[in-house]
Image (cartoon, rainbow, N blue to C red):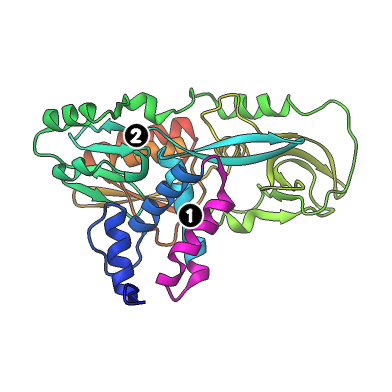
Amino acid sequence: MNNIKILSRADCLKYSSRSLGLPDLQKLDNALIAQALRRTVFIEAPCSIRTVCSLVMNSLGPLTDEPENLKTLIYDIIDDLVNLGDLLEMRDEIAGETNLILRPAPPAFVLRRDGTFIIVGVAGDDVTPPQVNDFNLVYYPSGLRILTPSNTQSCRQTLIDLGLIELPMITWLRAPVSITADKLVKSWISRLPNDIHPEKIENFEIIDISNTTSYYKGRWQSINEQHAGIYIARRPQRYGARLWCLAEIRDGLVQRFVDIHSGDARFRDCDEAWRLLAAMDALTGSPQQVRVVYEKEITVLSFTSPLPSWAIRRLSLVGERLKPHRALLQFSLPLHNSEEELHWLEESLWLTRD
């Protein structure tokens, strides 16, 4: 019994931080949660998102007075880590059901235009190689890990010597080829089955594109008699998360549908669905908007609709993700890069400036 010591919450935070390669923390923050998630996925993979969330909740739950808020935050950070390429979300077909599993990405780095580095992937149980701390490692709330070395070439060589893979910018971004909104929508409508079999499907929700693009959550609705046409939807399955699909709705019934799976395994189903939604919004004459605010040497971009992971990666490469205020997503970009990125958003997602 003499060897047992009761730790205070502050001590637990301190030792947890150190074990995850972080400086001593005074409170449970996003960086600690992100590191815990990286390590958990490395140990448990392949594993479901729900399993990872449960394990991290069990570990970190005693460090907070708001467990429900922590659970929501864990799910959000998992999404961030998938967006950044630290974790890989893959489809797993079991007994006819589609489930999503997580695996750790191999440790790698991306050299940014300003001479800093993005660290991605999971370097085993250490999560982040401890040697990189010599190059001013900064953890961001979004889960991003940035190195800001005084000597770019020395840092690059050290990362290579440590066994990290150097990812060219274009490889890490993994953006799809730009096409017109009309072509994308037509390509998906053409995949709908020819035969129509009207049916009522419980818990089948659609995105009503007639509703404003400024409130994403409010666009989701259950089917009613007034809905008629082609909609992006999510349908239930016996086990696992609901599946994204494109459906024709009429008379309160699902006439036909096709599941949304990208032809490229690098893209998640939700990425393709959100890209398709942006295209459909553009064709209806109500394109999604990006609010642009210029502040001295930076430009702040605010989005009220979700962005595909490849768009988040690109904006993270150029700028910094912010805690959103009256928006779903918000980024700060250097003023001299903003026009190029806005033009890219207009071309790839058909967004307009607010």
Residue type indicated by callout 1: Asp
Front residue of this view, candidates 349 and 176: 176
Tell me which residue sits at (43%, 45%) in the image: 81
Is the residue under label 2 in contact with that under label 1 (CB below 8 Å)? Answer: no
Residue 82, horizontal then vertical, whole percent: 46, 42
Residue at 50 percent across and 63 percent down: it is 58
Q: Is residue 213 visible?
A: no
Is residue 60 rendered magenta in the image?
Answer: yes
Comparing 110 with 229, the one in front is 110
CA separation in Å, label 1 and label 2: 22 Å
Q: Which residue is mark 1?
A: 76
SS of the residue under disc 2: loop
Q: Main secondary structure of the magenta part?
A: helix
Q: Which circle, 1 or 2, is nearer the viewer?
A: 2
Is 298 situated above or below 73?
above
Going 73% across and 25% down the picture, which residue do you hit?
Answer: 191
Asked where in the image residue 127 lies, by quadrant, the reply is top left
Residue 150 located left or right of residue 5 = left
Q: Residue 285 placed where, x, y %?
A: 59, 40
- Indicate the amino acid at tag 2: Pro
Q: Is residue 179 magenta?
A: no
Magenta extent: 45-69
Residue furthest to the left in view is 150
